[in-house]
Image (spheres, grey):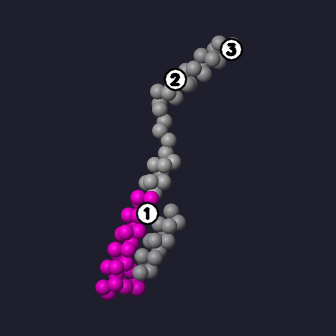
């Protein structure tokens, strides 16, 4: 998120400086490229750390624990 804040902050300063000049387009292209790169990297990071939770397996484990507790009583 810090990288995104830096990118947006830079673009705001760039837009204030070059608002009506042709150089504004170059900054806009760089901002869009940076935003796309940030999005791809964020998705890649989330997918690499994501975990698939198998609900059926979770239910089986809970049922097994309940049966185990009943037997021990």
User: Does 43 sit above or below residue 36?
Assistant: above
**Residue 9 at x, y percent in the picture:** 47, 74
User: Does 61 sit above or below residue 32?
Assistant: above
User: For the residues marked 1 and 2, what is the alpha-carbon distance in whole angstroms?
Assistant: 40 Å
Q: Which residues are magenta?
A: 15-41
Question: Which residue occupies 32% across, 79% down?
Answer: 25
Q: Which secondary structure class fits the magenta region best? A: helix
Q: Say whether residue 19 is left or right of residue 5.
A: left
Q: Which residue is mark 3?
A: 72
Mark sitting earlier along the chain (1/2): 1
Pick the quarter of the image with the C terminus: top right
Tell me the crowding category of disc 3: few under 14, some 14 to 19, or many 20 or more residues within 10 angstroms, Cα based: few
Question: Which residue occupies 47% across, 66% down?
Answer: 4
In front: 41, or 69?
41
Dots 3 and 2: beta carbons under 8 Å? no
Q: Residue furthest right?
A: 73
In front: 17, or 58?
58
Q: Which residue is mark 2?
A: 60
Dots 3 and 1: beta carbons under 8 Å? no
SS state under label 1: helix
Mark sitting earlier along the chain (3/1): 1
User: Does 45 sit above or below residue 26?
Assistant: above
**Residue 19 at x, y percent in the picture:** 35, 83
Question: Which residue occupies 60% across, 22% down?
Answer: 65
Dots 1 and 2: beta carbons under 8 Å? no
Residue 34 drawn in magenta? yes
The tag on residue 38 is 1
**Residue 55 at x, y percent in the picture:** 47, 30
Quarter assignment of residue 70? top right
User: For the residues marked 3 and 1, what is the alpha-carbon distance in whole angstroms?
Assistant: 53 Å
Mark sitting earlier along the chain (3/2): 2
SS state under label 2: helix
């Amino acid at each position: 998120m810090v990288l995104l804040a830096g990118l947006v902050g830079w673009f705001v300063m760039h837009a204030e400086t070059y608002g009506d000049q042709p150089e504004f387009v170059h900054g806009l292209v760089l901002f869009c490229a940076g935003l796309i790169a940030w999005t791809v990297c964020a998705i890649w990071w989330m997918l690499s750390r994501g975990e698939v939770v198998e609900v059926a397996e979770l239910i089986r484990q809970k049922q097994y624990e309940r049966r185990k507790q009943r037997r021990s009583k």
